[in-house]
Image (cartoon, rainbow, N blue to C red):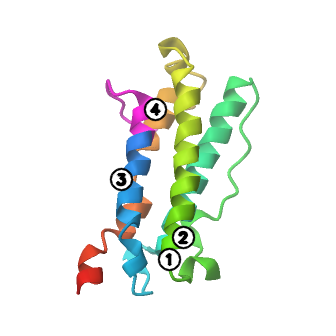
């Protein structure tokens, strides 16, 4: 396993994902104030729509991995463009309706994750399979809120 292997702790892995999604949605509540200027994070740029897209894609990608592994199948190879691209849709204004749609999409993905993870026992969550992360490590990897944090809290922008 590589140095980027997620560190786990005694938290419920389902709760880890629920909390990450809740954090992203709290930030997203401020995004209707977005001024249309992409935010730079490292060598990439982020917008509210891109952050939601990437978070949803990240949850979906690893959910497909989890389901494939549980079914004894190899996960599909990763062909996402991910953060390397910014689409025209990513540059659109972020409205209250977009927030409602994001909330519906992300809370449903978090619920699917929660139900699936809570159906697994500790032995299955911690089973080592070759050089892949354990399923618990995959869940803790999804604790990363980088995309939402890159856009940040725009409360001061809205008030300014």
Q: Can I make out residue 157 in this image? A: yes
Residue annotated with mark 3: 23
> Residue 145, how many percent across, how many down?
39, 54
* Residue beneath the point at 48% across and 72% down: 96
Q: Distance from label 2 to label 1 (Cα)?
A: 5 Å
| Disc 2 to disc 1: CB gap under 8 Å | yes
Q: Quadrant of residue 83?
A: bottom right
Residue annotated with mark 2: 98
* Residue beneath the point at 39% across and 27% down: 12
In the rendered structure, does residue 140 fall within the stretch colored magenta? no
Q: Distance from label 3 to label 1 (Cα)?
A: 19 Å
> Against 5, is 52 above or below?
below
For marks 3 and 1, the one nearer the N-term is: 3
Q: What segment is highlighted magenta in the picture?
A: 1-17
Q: Can I make out residue 4 in this image? A: no
Q: Is residue 146 left or right of residue 58?
A: left
Q: Distance from label 4 to label 3 (Cα)?
A: 14 Å
């Amino acid at each position: 396993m590589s140095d980027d292997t997620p560190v786990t702790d005694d938290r419920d892995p389902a709760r880890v994902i629920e909390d990450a999604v809740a954090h992203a949605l709290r930030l997203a509540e401020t995004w209707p104030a977005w001024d249309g200027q992409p935010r730079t994070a490292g060598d990439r740029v982020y917008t509210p729509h891109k952050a939601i897209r990437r978070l949803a894609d990240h949850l979906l990608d690893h959910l497909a991995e989890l389901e494939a592994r549980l079914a004894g199948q190899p996960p599909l190879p990763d062909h996402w463009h991910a953060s390397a691209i910014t689409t025209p849709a990513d540059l659109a204004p972020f409205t209250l309706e977009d927030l409602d749609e994001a909330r519906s999409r992300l809370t449903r993905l978090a619920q699917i994750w929660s139900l699936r993870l809570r159906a697994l026992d500790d032995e299955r969550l911690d089973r080592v399979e070759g050089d892949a992360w354990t399923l618990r490590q995959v869940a803790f990897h999804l604790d990363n809120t980088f995309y939402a944090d890159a856009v940040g809290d725009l409360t001061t922008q809205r008030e300014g």
